[in-house]
Protein backbone atom coordinates (compact mmCIF):
# COMPACT_ATOMS: atom_id res chain seq x y z
CA UNK A 1 0.00 0.00 0.00
CA UNK A 2 1.31 3.47 -0.80
CA UNK A 3 2.05 5.80 2.09
CA UNK A 4 -0.51 8.51 2.92
CA UNK A 5 0.97 11.98 3.50
CA UNK A 6 -2.16 13.74 4.83
CA UNK A 7 -2.29 13.63 8.68
CA UNK A 8 -6.07 14.21 8.80
CA UNK A 9 -6.66 11.33 6.41
CA UNK A 10 -4.33 9.10 8.43
CA UNK A 11 -6.23 9.94 11.63
CA UNK A 12 -9.57 9.23 9.94
CA UNK A 13 -8.30 5.91 8.59
CA UNK A 14 -6.91 4.97 12.00
CA UNK A 15 -10.28 5.77 13.55
CA UNK A 16 -12.32 3.83 10.99
CA UNK A 17 -9.93 0.90 10.46
CA UNK A 18 -7.49 0.24 13.30
CA UNK A 19 -5.48 -2.54 11.56
CA UNK A 20 -3.49 -2.36 8.35
CA UNK A 21 -5.60 -5.07 6.67
CA UNK A 22 -8.82 -3.18 7.42
CA UNK A 23 -7.29 0.02 6.00
CA UNK A 24 -6.40 -1.78 2.77
CA UNK A 25 -9.97 -3.10 2.49
CA UNK A 26 -11.40 0.35 3.26
CA UNK A 27 -9.19 2.08 0.68
CA UNK A 28 -10.11 -0.53 -1.96
CA UNK A 29 -13.83 0.00 -1.25
CA UNK A 30 -13.26 3.75 -1.57
CA UNK A 31 -11.47 3.27 -4.88
CA UNK A 32 -14.34 1.12 -6.20
CA UNK A 33 -16.88 3.73 -5.10
CA UNK A 34 -14.94 6.47 -6.90
CA UNK A 35 -14.84 4.33 -10.02
CA UNK A 36 -18.61 3.75 -9.82
CA UNK A 37 -19.22 7.49 -9.34
CA UNK A 38 -17.13 8.30 -12.40
CA UNK A 39 -19.16 5.79 -14.38
CA UNK A 40 -22.36 7.49 -13.22
CA UNK A 41 -21.06 10.90 -14.27
CA UNK A 42 -20.39 9.64 -17.80
CA UNK A 43 -22.83 6.77 -18.38
CA UNK A 44 -22.42 4.29 -21.18
CA UNK A 45 -24.92 4.48 -24.05
CA UNK A 46 -27.77 1.98 -24.05
CA UNK A 47 -26.92 -1.44 -25.50
CA UNK A 48 -29.18 -1.01 -28.55
CA UNK A 49 -27.91 2.49 -29.36
CA UNK A 50 -25.74 1.48 -32.33
CA UNK A 51 -28.41 -0.78 -33.79
CA UNK A 52 -31.06 1.95 -33.56
CA UNK A 53 -28.78 4.53 -35.14
CA UNK A 54 -27.85 2.18 -37.96
CA UNK A 55 -31.52 1.34 -38.60
CA UNK A 56 -32.30 5.07 -38.85
CA UNK A 57 -29.41 5.51 -41.27
CA UNK A 58 -30.68 2.60 -43.37
CA UNK A 59 -34.20 4.07 -43.43
CA UNK A 60 -33.05 7.55 -44.42
CA UNK A 61 -33.15 8.20 -48.14
CA UNK A 62 -29.85 8.64 -49.89
CA UNK A 63 -29.07 12.21 -50.84
CA UNK A 64 -29.44 12.54 -54.61
CA UNK A 65 -26.60 14.01 -56.61
CA UNK A 66 -27.27 17.55 -57.64
CA UNK A 67 -26.27 19.12 -60.93
CA UNK A 68 -23.69 21.25 -59.14
CA UNK A 69 -22.04 18.15 -57.68
CA UNK A 70 -21.86 16.46 -61.07
CA UNK A 71 -20.55 19.54 -62.87
CA UNK A 72 -17.92 20.25 -60.22
CA UNK A 73 -16.71 16.64 -60.42
CA UNK A 74 -16.58 16.83 -64.22
CA UNK A 75 -14.68 20.14 -64.03
CA UNK A 76 -12.14 18.78 -61.55
CA UNK A 77 -11.50 15.63 -63.57
CA UNK A 78 -11.36 17.58 -66.84
CA UNK A 79 -8.90 20.18 -65.57
CA UNK A 80 -6.72 17.49 -64.01
CA UNK A 81 -6.65 15.39 -67.17
CA UNK A 82 -5.97 18.37 -69.43
CA UNK A 83 -3.11 19.55 -67.21
CA UNK A 84 -1.63 16.06 -67.26
CA UNK A 85 -1.86 15.88 -71.06
CA UNK A 86 -0.35 19.38 -71.41
CA UNK A 87 2.51 18.43 -69.09
CA UNK A 88 3.25 15.34 -71.15
CA UNK A 89 3.07 17.20 -74.47
CA UNK A 90 5.25 20.10 -73.27
CA UNK A 91 7.85 17.71 -71.97
CA UNK A 92 8.53 16.35 -75.46
CA UNK A 93 6.57 13.15 -75.51
CA UNK A 94 5.45 10.36 -73.28
CA UNK A 95 8.76 8.58 -72.83
CA UNK A 96 11.46 11.22 -72.54
CA UNK A 97 12.13 14.47 -70.77
CA UNK A 98 9.17 14.59 -68.40
CA UNK A 99 11.42 14.70 -65.34
CA UNK A 100 13.51 17.47 -66.85
CA UNK A 101 10.42 19.49 -67.71
CA UNK A 102 9.05 19.03 -64.22
CA UNK A 103 12.38 20.08 -62.68
CA UNK A 104 12.47 23.12 -64.96
CA UNK A 105 8.98 24.11 -63.83
CA UNK A 106 10.00 23.75 -60.18
CA UNK A 107 13.10 25.92 -60.74
CA UNK A 108 11.03 28.58 -62.51
CA UNK A 109 8.48 28.55 -59.69
CA UNK A 110 11.31 28.95 -57.17
CA UNK A 111 12.70 31.91 -59.10
CA UNK A 112 9.22 33.43 -59.24
CA UNK A 113 8.78 33.02 -55.48
CA UNK A 114 12.15 34.65 -54.82
CA UNK A 115 11.25 37.53 -57.14
CA UNK A 116 7.86 37.92 -55.43
CA UNK A 117 9.57 37.95 -52.04
CA UNK A 118 12.02 40.64 -53.06
CA UNK A 119 9.22 42.69 -54.63
CA UNK A 120 7.16 42.37 -51.44
CA UNK A 121 10.20 43.41 -49.38
CA UNK A 122 10.74 46.47 -51.57
CA UNK A 123 7.05 47.31 -51.34
CA UNK A 124 7.10 46.85 -47.56
CA UNK A 125 10.13 49.10 -47.25
CA UNK A 126 8.59 51.92 -49.27
CA UNK A 127 4.85 51.66 -48.48
CA UNK A 128 4.12 49.51 -45.44
CA UNK A 129 0.68 50.87 -44.52
CA UNK A 130 -0.91 50.58 -47.98
CA UNK A 131 0.57 47.09 -48.27
CA UNK A 132 -0.96 46.01 -44.96
CA UNK A 133 -4.34 47.50 -45.87
CA UNK A 134 -4.31 45.90 -49.32
CA UNK A 135 -3.27 42.49 -48.03
CA UNK A 136 -5.86 42.67 -45.24
CA UNK A 137 -8.61 43.46 -47.74
CA UNK A 138 -7.42 40.64 -49.98
CA UNK A 139 -7.46 38.21 -47.04
CA UNK A 140 -10.94 39.32 -45.97
CA UNK A 141 -12.29 38.94 -49.51
CA UNK A 142 -10.72 35.51 -49.88
CA UNK A 143 -12.11 34.28 -46.56
CA UNK A 144 -15.56 35.63 -47.39
CA UNK A 145 -15.54 33.92 -50.77
CA UNK A 146 -14.32 30.68 -49.19
CA UNK A 147 -17.06 30.85 -46.54
CA UNK A 148 -19.75 31.32 -49.18
CA UNK A 149 -18.32 28.46 -51.22
CA UNK A 150 -18.24 26.05 -48.28
CA UNK A 151 -21.71 26.82 -46.86
CA UNK A 152 -24.29 24.29 -48.01
CA UNK A 153 -27.07 25.69 -50.15
CA UNK A 154 -29.94 23.64 -48.74
CA UNK A 155 -29.76 22.60 -45.09
CA UNK A 156 -32.44 20.32 -43.72
CA UNK A 157 -32.42 19.20 -40.09
CA UNK A 158 -33.86 15.76 -39.39
CA UNK A 159 -34.71 14.77 -35.86
Image (cartoon, rainbow, N blue to C red):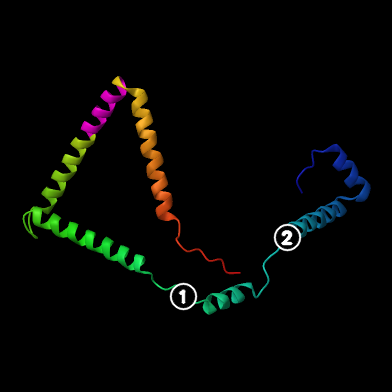
The residue at which mark 2 appears reads as 39
- In the image, the segment drawn in magenta is 114-125
Identify the image quadrant of residue 110: top left
* Rendered location of residue 147, percent (x, y): 43, 50
- Say left or right for 137 vs 97: right
Q: Residue at 28%, 25% (x, y): give it.
A: 123
User: Mark 2, residues whose alpha carbon is within 10 Å: few (<14), some, or many (≥20)?
Assistant: few
* Rendered location of residue 58, percent (x, y): 52, 78
The residue at which mark 1 appears reads as 62
* Rendered location of residue 69, percent (x, y): 36, 66
User: Mark 1, residues whose alpha carbon is within 10 Å: few (<14), some, or many (≥20)?
Assistant: few
- Say left or right for 56 vs 154: right
Q: Nearer the viewer, mark 2 or mark 1?
A: 1
* 72 in relation to 117, above or below: below
- Principal SS element in the magenta part? helix
Identify the image quadrant of residue 113: top left
Whether 123 is among the magenta residues is yes
* Rendered location of residue 70, percent (x, y): 32, 68
Amino acid sequence: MSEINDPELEALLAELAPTEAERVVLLEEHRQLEKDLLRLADPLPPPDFLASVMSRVAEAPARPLSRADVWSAVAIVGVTMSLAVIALLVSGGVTGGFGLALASIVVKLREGLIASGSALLALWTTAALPTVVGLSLLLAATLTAFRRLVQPAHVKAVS
